[in-house]
Amino acid sequence: MRKKIVAGNWKMNLTAEEAVQLNRDVENQIMDPKCDIYQFTPSLYLPLLVEKEGYIQIGAQNGHPEKKGAFTGEISMFQLQSSGVQSVLIGHSERRQLFHETNDFLKSKVDAALENNITPFYCCGETLEERESGKHEAVVIDQIKEGCFHLPAEKIRKIVFAYEPVWAIGTGKTASPEQANDMHRLIRNAIAENYDNEIAENATILYGGSCKPTNAKELFTMEHIDGGLIGGASLKADDFIQIINTLN
Ligand code: PGA
């Protein structure tokens, strides 16, 4: 059975105090979750949250593939692992667009994360222009192939995939459940073709992009959608909990 996950991506938001409070508020209100819950926090707050007991797993939003060296301002996957971090976002569209991260660079991050026993949450998704010109499927499959399909079978199993259409992120526009499900099916089929059916069936593929309490249920009940990667709505404990509860 594939894992169901609801993950919050806090991006560059919250003070240290607010971060601890949000984590605590969510933790205190979840009783018996039927899914795995993650919060991807600003790196600075990782030490405040990583060692805490509880349901919520804490992840990093970024990690550099080199182990150490002259990369001012960066934090390596190796350093994340040495601080107890066990999951990381890779390939988020904001990293791809604003920081010019290529599939090739993301591939090296995937490798470095896995070498350090960190679970990559590998994000993919097309821009509006790519969708309107009919290239969306090819773009997403290329992102996944170039970033992940070099991995051997035992390692591809460790990847959590997240489909996040760029045009839906932070815009209030959500992909329809059918649009999202179609893309998730395509990703699952690509995994089956490159590996096998069993690996594809067990792969967790999350949806992200303006997912909120009012639309989470219709998205999460689609056959190929195994949960969500939530931005804006993960910053409010009540909204995030309502989204988690749609999977309960
Ligand atoms: P959003 O962000 O939910 O605010 O659209 C999702 C994401 O960027 O992961």
Image: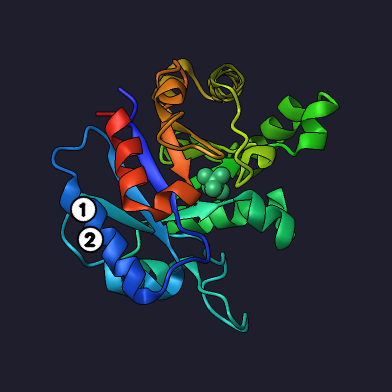
Q: Is residue 118 visible?
A: no
Q: Using the image, tell me which numbered label, if any, was put on residue 99.
A: none
Determine whether the residue tagged by mark 1 lies in a helix, strand or loop: helix
Side (left or right) of 176 relative to 88: right
Q: Nearer the viewer, residue 102 or 205?
A: 205
Q: Which residue carries the number 2 mark?
A: 24
Percent position (x, y) of residue 101?
Answer: 70, 57
Type of amino acid at the residue the image marks with label 2: Arg
Image-quadrant location for residue 123? top right
Side (left or right) of 50 relative to 80: left
**Quadrant in which the N terminus appears:** top left
Residue depicted at 31% across the width and 60% down the height: 22
Type of amino acid at the residue the image marks with label 1: Glu
Q: Nearer the viewer, residue 193 or 163?
A: 163
* Measured Cα–Cα span from mark 2 to mark 1: 5 Å
Residue depicted at 33% across the width and 31% down the height: 3
Percent position (x, y) of residue 233?
Answer: 44, 47
Q: Which residue carries the number 1 mark?
A: 27
Q: Is residue 10 above or below residue 1?
A: below
